[in-house]
Image (spheres, rainbow, N blue to C red):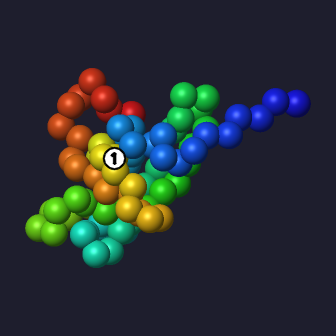
Amino acid sequence: EETDAISSQTFVGWVATIVRGSASFDLPAEAKLRDENGTVHYVLVAPDQKDIEFAAGTEVLIISKDSAVFRAVLNTNAALSA
């Protein structure tokens, strides 16, 4: 048997998709991302600015980790799309 363990800190720089809820600065939403092994991970994501909101289905780029919540910006680069 083989297993792979990765640190959630490595998710910074990856693209995730909001799958449940609407994310605002003070209220994160659930997002999913797929690692290089194809494993799906579910994380809490919130915008990095107070005046931004991400609806379900929005692709975001994770830019930092703040405790258990990842901060993100809107993914505007189609080459990074999941």
Residue 57 appears in the figure: no
Residue at far left of view: 51
User: What residue is pinned by disc 1?
Assistant: 62
Residue appearing at x 48%, y 46% in the figure: 9
Residue appearing at x 39%, y 55% in the figure: 65
The residue tagged with tag 1: helix, strand or loop?
A: strand
Residue at far top of view: 79
Q: Nearer the viewer, residue 30 or 4?
A: 4
Residue 82 at x, y percent in the picture = 39, 34
Left or right, 41 with reference to 68: right
In the figure, residue 77 lies in which quadrant?
top left
Q: Name the kind of residue labelled 1 in the image.
A: Ile
Left or right, 65 with reference to 63: right
Residue appearing at x 39%, y 43% in the figure: 12
Residue 26 at x, y percent in the picture = 28, 75
Is 79 rendered above or below residue 76?
Answer: above
